[in-house]
Amino acid sequence: MSMEVVNTVGRRKAAVARVYVKPGNGTITINKKPIEVYFPLEIFQFVVKQPLAVLNVAENYDVNINLDGGGIHGQAEAARLGIARALCEIDAEYRPILKKNGFLTRDPREVERKKPGQPGARRKFQFSKR
């Protein structure tokens, strides 16, 4: 097992998470703030911690995350992907478990572009027959 800092990147929609994982005692820091400050809502803390929780290794690693872009939900899921990828690099045996839980899949859904002659991507202006 490497004692070095493992660094990976996770993305979701417009959010980018640069994740640094090193052996430690389970502190998670996001943009130099504790996770409880950055994500006050329990659900997003839960999402970020999922890969660690599934493997029961939450107490073994310190995670430092740089989050940029996107909204709160995209950022949480980007962080989750980054952590999952880092854990795979640390120990290849984690891979099947993380894969089974779907933490290694980059969510490919992106915002569809707005088209000319209509107010949104799919929405049309109100049609008046006469």
Image (spheres, rainbow, N blue to C red):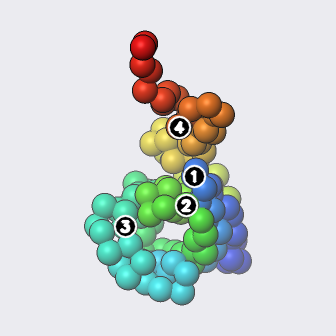
Where the C terminus falls, by quadrant?
top left
- Looking at the rendered structure, which numbered label has been put on residue 12? 1
* Residue at the disc numbered 2: 70
- Residue type, numbered disc 1: Arg
Between circles 1 and 4, the one closer to the viewer is 4
Q: Earlier in the sequence, mark 3 or mark 4?
A: 3
- Circles 2 and 4, Cβ within 8 Å, touching? The answer is no
Residue furthest out toward the front? 130
How far apart marks 2 and 4 lie (CA) works out to 22 Å
Q: Earlier in the sequence, mark 2 or mark 4?
A: 2
- Circles 3 and 4, Cβ within 8 Å, touching? The answer is no
Q: Earlier in the sequence, mark 2 or mark 3?
A: 3
Residue at disc 1, secondary structure: strand
Q: On the image, which quarter does residue 63 sit in?
A: bottom right
- Residue type, numbered disc 3: Gln
- Circles 2 and 3, Cβ within 8 Å, touching? The answer is no
Find residue 88 and report its horizontal and vertical position in percent.
Answer: 62, 55
Between circles 2 and 1, the one closer to the viewer is 2
Residue at coordinates 61% horizontally, 75% vertically from top-left?
66
How far apart marks 2 and 3 lie (CA) works out to 17 Å
Find residue 112 and report its horizontal and vertical position in percent.
Answer: 59, 37
- Residue type, numbered disc 4: Pro
> Does 126 sit above or below residue 73?
above
How far apart marks 3 and 4 lie (CA) works out to 36 Å
Q: Earlier in the sequence, mark 1 or mark 4?
A: 1
Q: Earlier in the sequence, mark 3 or mark 1?
A: 1
